[in-house]
Amino acid sequence: MKALSGRTDHVVVVGAGLAGLSAALHLLGAGRRVTVVERDAHAGGRAGRIERAGYLMDTGPTVLTMPDVLEETFAAVGARMRDHLELVALHPAYRARFADGSRIDVHTDAEAMAAEVERFAGAREAAGYRRLRRWLTDLYALQMGRFIDANFDSPWQLVHPDLVRLALAGGFGPLDRAIGRFLEDERLQRVFSFQSLYAGVAPSRALAAYAVIAYMDTVAGVYFPRGGMHAVPAAMARVAGAAGAELRFGEEVQALERRGERVTAVVTASGRIACDAVVLTPDLPVAYQLLGRRPRRPARLRHSPSAVVLHAGTDRTWPQLGHHTISFGGAWDGTFRELTRAGRVMSDPSLLITRPTATDPSLAPPGRHLHYILAPCPNTEVGPEAVHWGELGAPYRDSLVAELERRGMHGLGDSIEEECLVTPADWAARGHAAGTPFSVAHTFAQTGPFRPRNLVRGTDNAVLAGCGTTPGVGVPTVLLSGRLAALRITGAPDGRTRRPGPALPVANRQEVTR
């Protein structure tokens, strides 16, 4: 692994989101002096928060998996996650509801899920699920240490016996066909393949290797932090500050001072911060603009679909909802074509509905509830440009509410007391390329060593972190990106940066059934 040359005693981390705070904690643990500069008034980045009349709305990710990665991040400075953050294991992890009226709860316990699959689709599918679970676990073990939690300097690093094992396991075929080898029921196939949308690719076009995301969701488990998802960066920032980091909030980086190939200072409206190295976590175009250079690539980067999100504080809830509910429309393949090729909103949408107050009622006033409704939509490269969402947003919001009422959330529109609508225009205003919070899509040409590197040619002491670079999109992978960025600065004892294996137990975790 290539590490930065020269002095790296004082590192400035630009951005106090999950990636930046992860980098900061790992750097502090390695003995570096760290200054974190954040444009917002508080930590969080994408994992921010809006407060409206007692409703505490998480503005970013709602699904937390692989808590061992988060635990290791705290441990980098000798802290115990359990002393700063309380995680609740969700049972079920998801509830899936289908257009035909059927539903299935997705459990991470093998026996509970096998029994649920048998109830839902019969003994043959339950046996298929057991085989699928073993395959997902093997897939994770093959990929984690070698291909996910790894800094790549060259595609030649892929040449390893694990690559052959991954190919023999079917990791390079289409995801939907791989899942179909184990499950015949089309509804179940959706449950174990929709996760590819997180990576910006339809299941029919995604590599089967991306079933590792289904492992994270359906085997390793889904968790929720007491206090909401924003509690994660808030706790990380507190621990970083206690470990010696200087946290400067409300300061936007305006420029980087350079001397030759090295960044010598970070400039904000408050002045200059001299540094020996810098970690940049803004979205790629912003980071490249600060650096004054963009890497050469044979093809233009493709971005993931975006999302319209309706945060709704309501005076009621609906008992058919779990903490996380996936409401599938009748359409499937056509939906992905609309999102990624035709550039249209889904005509028959599949929606993620998160009800955080099912687990933590303190996120809303007494007797009230929060609902987070996410509708995937085209990004601004293939769909409507950001400027047009000012006109499209309100009508699309009304259509989503009407659709959910048709699907059983009767009276949703009348129940809303406080709301916040987020569209691609809002993501674009935050500096997210193509108006999407999900960054660069995980196509084959944008994965592993082919993804934008966390080192930038022509700058000797700058490293990138965040979902646009290695290893990619998602809470655990963004945390890993911060760790991998820190390793570029501190160096690693060998090429393997983390032991592969199943998720570690989370100390002092609670469990909840909804």
Image: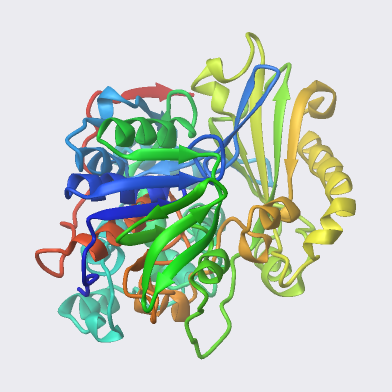
Residue 408, compared with residue 361, is above or below; it is below
Query: At 25% across and 47% down in the image, what residue appears?
Result: 33
Q: How many marks?
A: 0
Q: Quadrant of residue 330?
A: bottom right
Q: Is residue 210 left or right of residue 25?
A: right
Residue 430, compared with residue 368, is above or below; it is below
505 or 35: nearer the eye? 35
157 or 452: nearer the eye? 452
Tell which residue pokes out farthest to the bottom in this image.
298
487 or 475: nearer the eye? 487
Colour mapping used in the image: rainbow
Tell which residue pokes out farthest to the left in this image.
493
Q: Quadrant of residue 158?
A: bottom left
Q: Position of residue 139 (x, y in %)?
A: 28, 63
Query: At 45% across and 40% down in the image, what residue appears?
Result: 248
Q: Quadrant of residue 264?
A: bottom left
Quadrant where the N terminus sits is: bottom left
Query: At 76% across and 73% down in the image, what residue appears?
Result: 342
Residue 459, compared with residue 508, is above or below; it is below
Query: At 17% across and 64% down in the image, what residue appears?
Result: 491
Q: Position of residue 37 (x, y in %)?
A: 45, 46
Q: Position of residue 235 (x, y in %)?
A: 37, 30
Residue 111, compared with residue 193, is above or below; it is above
Residue 101 is at least partly visible in this image? yes
350 or 283: nearer the eye? 283
Q: Position of residue 263 (x, y in %)?
A: 38, 67
Residue 319 is at least partly visible in this image? no
Q: Is residue 237 left or right of residue 61?
A: left
